[in-house]
Image (cartoon, rainbow, N blue to C red):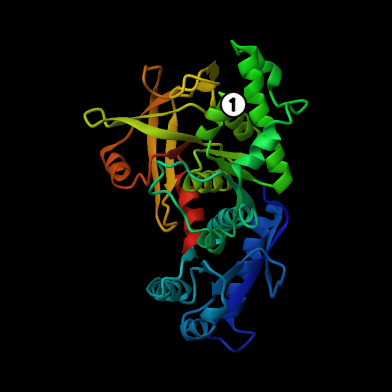
Amino acid sequence: MYIIYTMKVNLIRYSNVIDPNSTYLKDSNQFIEDINNELFEDDIELVESCEDALYSIVFIETGGSEQSFVKDVDNLSHPVILLSHCKNNSLPACFEIKTYLDSQKIDCILLFGNEKECADQIRKVTELFGNASKIKKTKLGVIGKPSDWLIASKVDYEEVKKKFDIELIDITSEELKEEINKGLLPNIYKEDELRNLASDEQVFEGALDIYSGLKRIIEKYNLAGFTLRCFDLIEEYKNTACLAFAILNDEGYLAACEGDVPALLTMSLIKASTGLSSFQANPSKISISDKSVLFAHCTLPLNMCKKVELMTHYESGLGIGVRGTLELSTVTIVKIAPNLKDILCIRGEIVKNEALPNYCRTQIEVKFDNENLFEFLKDSFGNHVLVCYGDVAEEILTMFHYFID
């Protein structure tokens, strides 16, 4: 997870008590003071009327506050973060308000428990808002058009801007080729290490030319990442972008194959919510009896590999395809739907690294339980999914709903 530094949280209070000396208000004042004491070492503080706060928390101090809340609901930022405490009918009022917000299709997060438990929840929410800010205002490149076979993977650029505050920038293949033709950049990341794995020096140099061209495009447009219609490069250069993707994803950029914009957005969501790189893969074979799926592709982030081999690209037999050996571990399979409203986010286990013929070079067998396999078959949302290490569905889903609800 990313580290969140000194953070002010705007506190909005609702109470049906008028007397400032009321015991009710003394209880709630003490509750907020105790929470701030818990949060002190985290550099997080709840502050009333704080204009430069990252987000707001709505503190329902007493029962009977519901009507006052409803009058102001249109002025509150979404999702609405409700804070309750264990006295003065605060919690039942929060449940009533949450039910109202649900009926209005307004996303709501309810914080409850004692001071320490609420402080723990506030830490998580603050991390969510801080990480979400890493997506907003970013620029992602779409280099060339999506590959012809991605017939169901188009997205509405305006909706992407509206929901995620991400700007998608169209960049022509011709412009990329101009940058590739300028040759190698100096001091390429992990160049010496990778050169030792290459069997053909000329092919390796050509793959680094493609990396260099992509890196220049990233710097030219100040991109957080891109997706590329990569098969077109094979005709022009008799080489592939697979190695470039592997290096760039390891460097912290987002590099998605085949012009797949939903895959790129999914990579961005995973990176922001967990800090993790992700493997864009095809579901290539399904075993119902074993409840497993073989996921395969010719590139993946180098930082996801225990071992790396440089081979040829599977479909063309040209250039460099990356075979990575992954840890046998829990993974989360993720894909944002092209409609930007739905998401696949399920848990699985890598049980085997494969090296089968007639599949892309990196191959992992992932085993699911019945429920998650059914979910995958029902909602895979296209021919690519993203695989990341760990059981991180909660973090990913929380951030996804922060943006779309």
**Mark 1 = which residue?**
237
Q: Is residue 206 above or below residue 98?
A: above
Image coords of residue 338 (percent x, y): 42, 53
**As drawn, is 365 to the left or to the right of 119?**
left
**Which residue does the image show at 37% across and 17% down from the upper left?**
356
Closer to the camera, 176 or 81? 176
Image coords of residue 210 (percent x, y): 64, 30
- Where is residue 347, by image quadrant? top left
Mark 1 nearby-residue class (10 Å; few <14, some 14–19, many ≥20): some
- Where is residue 21, by image quadrant? bottom right
**Which residue does the image show at 54% across and 16% down from the upper left?**
309
Closer to the camera, 276 or 90? 276
**As drawn, is 107 to the left or to the right of 198?**
left
**Which residue does the image show at 72% across and 38% down from the upper left?**
216
Direction left: furthest residue = 289
Query: Circle 1 sits in a helix, a strand or a loop, which is it?
Result: helix
